[in-house]
Structure formats: C-alpha cells, structure tokens
Amino acid sequence: MTAPDRRTARLLERVLITGAGGQLGVALREAFPAATALTRSDWDVTMPAPSGLLPSLVLHAAAWTDVDGAEAAEDAADAANVVGTRNVAGLGAPLVAYSSDYVFDGTKREPYVESDETGPVSAYGRSKLAAEREISEGWTVRTSWLFGATGHNFVRTMLSLGETRDEVQVVDDQVGCPTYVGHLATATGELLGRSGGIWHLAAQGECSWAEFAEAIFEERGLGCRVERIRTAELQRPATRPAYSVLRSERPDAPLLPHWREGLRECLSRIGNAT
Ligand SMILES: NC(=O)c1ccc[n+]([C@@H]2O[C@H](COP(=O)([O-])OP(=O)(O)OC[C@H]3O[C@@H](n4cnc5c(N)ncnc54)[C@H](OP(=O)(O)O)[C@@H]3O)[C@@H](O)[C@H]2O)c1
C-alpha cells in the first residue's frame, strides 16, 4: 500500500466513526482501526455532541435506516438523519457522510450518476436527501443495498429463511447494486485522496432482489426456491425506486468489486453462523 499524501495523512490523524454499531460502522472500524468508534449509546446524534471531540475527519454512518418505519415516523427519521448530520457537521471536521440510492425516483432504466436529478419517493429518501444538504465540507457517498456479516440485512435474512423453508417469495421488479460493506469501507479510504462533493460508490453489476436471493442460495448450496413476485403484492408502507443502480460519472471514482464477489466475501465471513 502506498503512503497517504500529506492532506490525507492529516485527515487520518483523529478519525471519528458515528453509528459504529451498524453494519457499515463495523466495517469502517475494521478499515480504520485507530479511529474513535461511537455507537448510538456513546452519542445519539440527535443530541449535541459530547464535549471533547476534536476529530480531523468524521465517517458518519449513524442513520435512521428503517425505510418502512420512516413513513409513520418522518419526524423521528428527520431527527436522526437531518438534525443528526447537522450536529455531526457542527464538529467542524470534514465528513464522509453516507447517503442512498433512495434519493432517486427509480424511473430511469440506466444507471444514476451524480448529476442526475433527485426525486425521493419515500420519507426515508427525503430525509437522506435533506441530510445531504447539511454537509458543507467533505464527501457525500451515495451507496445502495448494503449487506455485511453483521446486523440486519437481506443476506442474513435470506440465509435464515433458506435454511428453514423450501421456498421464499422475493420481489423481482426492483433492481439495484447490492454492495458489501467491507468493499465500501475500503473505497472510503481511497476517496480521501480525491476532491469532495457527491460520489456514487456501489458494487459493479446489477440485479433484482429475487436474483440476489437466488445467488445467496446458490453460493450457500441451499435448495430453497425463489418465487418471483411483484412489489405491489407485498403492500409495504414505503414506495421504493424500481431501478436504482448507481454509477459514478467521475473519472477518478474508486471502483468497487462486483456484487457477487462481495456476496462471496460476506458469506465466508459469516461462516456457518447465521
Ligand atoms: N442499509 C442499506 O441498504 C443502505 C443503503 C444505502 C445507504 N445506506 C446508508 O448507509 C449508512 C449506514 O447504513 P447501515 O446499513 O450500516 O445501517 P444500520 O446497520 O442500520 O446502522 C445504522 C446505525 O446508526 C445507529 N443510529 C440510528 N439512529 C441513531 C442516532 N440517533 N444516533 C446515533 N446512532 C444512531 C443505529 O443504531 P441502532 O441499531 O441502535 O438503531 C445503527 O447502529 C446510513 O447512512 C444509511 O442511510 C444504507
């Protein structure tokens, strides 16, 4: 690995991670082992920052991420995502703040790039877009369909269903880029040598949730079948974009591996414990 340039080295002097108990937070702790890692019990970001924090860089992974729950609790989602980001930005250090493919409406049929118009179709998406506007210095990383070896995510849910059922119903009319948190954490490190602003960082490739479920079962050797259904059949509270593949139009964007590679890496980290 090459030594960081002077600016990056200064940024890395006192790194703070928020939301360190979440799936991305755990991956960031691994990628930045010298960082101060704060879980929600250390700092609820809706509250003013604890005294004495003087970070040189904040990796802001704390967020309200319950997409359906946000529909009935938009104020609480905004408190965590918008006020929370404001409080974190108030520390005065540059941020890497994580945003979402759900800031788009999903009507495109080719990948969304940084300059595309936003148009969230859910309370969660609106709160993430409003959070982006709180960031004045640093990097806004839009990413998508995160999964890792810890926490609540689609891979872990499918593994436990696949071990106990012959068949699961999964939607086949939402397409995105399932992104492994370990790959995103590595790309975050690469981003620090680049200029700030909005960056789309998601895995290569694209698939539907049903195709992702099939890949999970195939990689794991589980015989569970996937019945492909439509989103409307699920009647979930939040509307989700039908297509939210993210790509970067920036020539120096860090490239993440393909989602299938991320899946294999995640499954090997999970081992046999789900
Ligand atoms: N998950 C995805 O598919 C996805 C896709 C695109 C973008 N993102 C973005 O990526 C980032 C990381 O997401 P993730 O998947 O790692 O989510 P996650 O696993 O749900 O982790 C979020 C963490 O934030 C914490 N948190 C929630 N409210 C907080 C508050 N008020 N103060 C401090 N901490 C708080 C949560 O704590 P508790 O567990 O105690 O609530 C949790 O540890 C978020 O900004 C998210 O919006 C996620």
Image (spheres, rainbow, N blue to C red):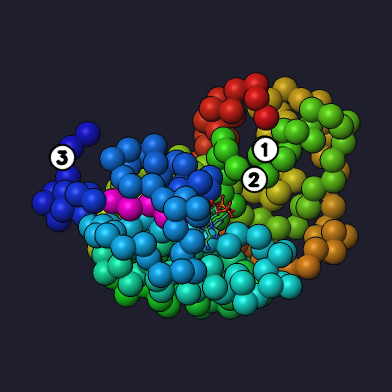
| Residue identifier under label 2 | 152
Within 10 angstroms of label 3, few (less than 14), some, or many (20 or more) residues? few
- Report how far apart the C-alphas of labels 1 and 3 lie in the structure: 36 Å
The mark tally for this picture is 3
State which tag comes first along the sequence, 1 or 3.
3
Asked if the beta carbon under badge 3 is closer than 8 A to the nearest atom of ligand 1, the reply is no
Q: Please tell me whether residue 221 is drawn above or below residue 95 in the rendered image.
A: above
The amino acid type found where label 1 is placed reads Arg
- Report how far apart the C-alphas of labels 2 and 3 lie in the structure: 35 Å
Give, as a single range, the part of the protein colored magenta.
Answer: 15-19
Q: Quadrant of ligand 1?
A: bottom right
Locate residue 122: give its quadrant. bottom right
Answer whether residue 57 is visible to the viewer in this image. Answer: yes
- Magenta span contains residue 69: no
The amino acid type found where label 3 is placed reads Ala
| Residue identifier under label 3 | 3
Q: Are marks 2 and 1 in contact (CB under 8 Å)?
A: yes
State which tag comes first along the sequence, 2 or 3.
3
Within 10 angstroms of label 2, few (less than 14), some, or many (20 or more) residues? few
Instruction: Residue at 52%, 30% (x, y): give it.
Output: 265
Image coordinates of residue 206 in percent, x first then y, are: 59, 49
Q: Please tell me whether residue 242 is drawn above or below residue 130 in the rendered image.
A: above
| Residue identifier under label 1 | 156
Image coordinates of residue 89 in percent, x first then y, are: 35, 70
Asked if the beta carbon under badge 2 is closer than 8 A to the nearest atom of ligand 1, the reply is yes
Q: Nearer the viewer, residue 46 or 266?
A: 46
